[in-house]
Amino acid sequence: MIKAVFLDRDGTLIYEKPGVYLSRPEQVRLYKSTKPALELLSKCGFKLFIVSNQSGIGRGYFTAKEVNAVHEHLRRLLRPARVEDIVFCPHAPDEHCTCRKPQPKLGLDLIKKYHIDVAQSYMIGDKKADVEFGQALGCKTVLVTTANGKNHLKKYPHLRPNKVATNLLNAAKFIVKSTEK
Ligand SMILES: [Mg+2]
Ligand SMILES: [Zn+2]
């Protein structure tokens, strides 16, 4: 069994502009703390997975092929940190699919495929849906207050992540510290 960190993409690993659906590799900009955070988690023995809602596909703004090109570029930018797998929901909300976060399907598939021990695993994201996704899987959750995080924390006071962190590096530090206990 392996321990994993599931990561949201937009607003967690890379900058998210409100109202902008990122579809081209050259639009990808990592947060300053992204690479150090991923290196820290890898060093601590966590395998990394990106789980993303890409409703821009279902809305007809871009194709799955374009999303895959963005992900190839993202993997290059993240080196030497290594992401095991990147999975995404391509549906628009009104398609009522079973794979859009907070629904746990994408995570459950990864858990099965990679023999992930959820009790030792974490989900990091900037939205309510990310926290609820992690909780549905039985992981611990960290809400980063980048992008939508601050807003969602205020808007959904019932939301109970295990930790609120100001950026991805602080989220990673929290995870490493909790592991040491
Ligand atoms: Mg996000
Ligand atoms: Zn879906």
Image (cartoon, helix red, strand yellow):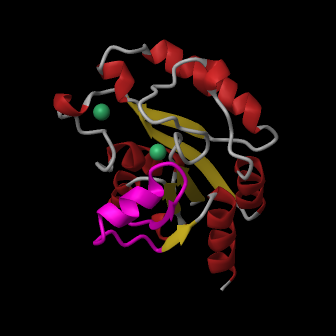
- Residue furthest toward the right? 80
Check the picture and name the quadrant holding the C terminus: bottom right
Above-or-below relation of 82 to 40: above
Q: Does the magenta stretch include residue 145?
A: yes
Residue 147, percent from left and from top: 51, 48
Above-or-below relation of 53 to 24: below
Q: Give whichever of 73, 164 is nearer the camera.
A: 164
Q: Give whichever of 86, 69 is nearer the camera.
A: 69
Identity of the residue drawn at 49% across and 58% down: 123
User: Which stretch appears magenta?
Assistant: 137-162
Residue 73, percent from left and from top: 68, 24
Identity of the residue drawn at 27% across and 28% down: 92
Residue 172, percent from left and from top: 66, 64
Q: Is residue 177 magenta?
A: no
Above-or-below relation of 84 to 58: below
Q: Look at the image and tell me whether residue 59 can be seen.
A: yes
Above-or-below relation of 178 to 44: below
Count of marks overlaid on the render: 0
Please give left or right for residue 110 compared with residue 71 in the image.
left
Residue 51, percent from left and from top: 47, 42
Please give left or right for residue 150 compared with residue 146 in the image.
left
Check the picture and name the quadrant holding the N terminus: bottom right
Identity of the residue drawn at 67% across and 34% down: 29
Identity of the residue drawn at 46% across and 60% down: 150
Q: Look at the image and tell me whether residue 117 can be seen.
A: no
Please give left or right for residue 162 compared with residue 32 in the image.
left
Q: Give whichever of 46, 168 is nearer the camera.
A: 168
